[in-house]
Amino acid sequence: MAQKIINFYANQLSVNVTLVLVFEPPLPSARSLVWKEIKFFPMFRSHAKATVTCDRSPRLAIGIEQTVEDTNVFPATWLEIKGDYTTVTGSEKQNYLGIGYFTPYDYGNYDYDYDIDPPDWDEDPGPSMCKCVNQCNSSIDFQLGLAHGEGMNQRFEPIILWKDIVPSCTVTFSPKLILLGYAIKNYKGNGPLFDKIESEPTWSQDISLLDDETSWNLVQDKTTGTMTVERADVI
């Protein structure tokens, strides 16, 4: 699949800086998982460069029954969202999570019943939404993630986590992907969950609006030490 390339440059830093990349939680109840960590060190005579890539048209998926190991979250099972009604089935072969119709519509004007077929929409009523319903008898955790590859080479990359979703609870969210960057001095990560800092993100971009290749400079103010990320003029 075609990819988008994002280049980051840094020079003349006075301290170690980590650019932590996460996706913006679509709801306050969700938690971001660390997507990338880019470490820059003081280099006064040369530029440091780091490149990250993402799919030009990201494929979204839902995973359940996660286990946490070191800095990674692994779902027991996951399923790509492809625009229909479906159910993610857990290891106990019970129906755990129902995933709603992935087509733009107005949830406020339709009472969804997962035992009926989706309606025919004559017009586009609004932004795309995803609706997930906990269909088991206990609370569950689930993740929104990116699907990569095909067939036996498919893999799931979690980016957002919901915890303790109670039975029959519905989670409705927009799948819009906003990538946030936090430039943190002397960063010490403590696992896959990103502990949001009080300040605003240093960098924010809608993945769908990025050009196929962009470059950005990580700049430290010589007086205040404040970190900013600015668009580079050339690649």
Image: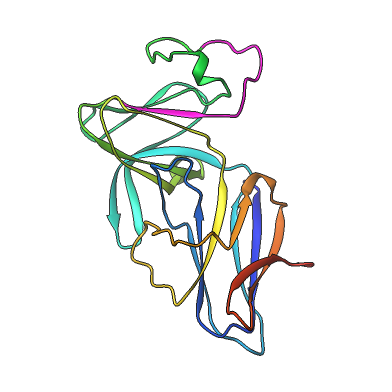
For this view, does 30 lie left or right of residue 203? left
Residue range in magenta is 119-134
Residue at point 45% right, 44% down?
Answer: 145
- Please tell me which residue is depicted at 54% across the width and 40% down the height of the picture: 59
**Where is residue 130 shown, x and y percent of the image?**
48, 30
Above or below, 165 relative to 223: above
Residue at 35% across / 57% down in the picture? 72
Is residue 206 shown in magenta?
A: no
Drawn side of residue 142 relative to residue 40, left or right:
left
Location of the C terminus (image quadrant):
bottom right
Toward the viewer: 78 or 107? 107
Q: Position of residue 84 (x, y in %)?
A: 49, 22
Residue 186 horizontal side relative to residue 219, left or right: left
Residue 126 lies in quadrant: top right
Q: On screen, 101 above or below 157? A: above
Considering the whole magenta stretch, tell me its main secondary structure. Answer: loop
State whether residue 117 is above or below residue 64: above
* Residue drawn at the location 25% of the way across and 28% of the way down: 167
Residue that sits furthest to the bottom in the current view: 45
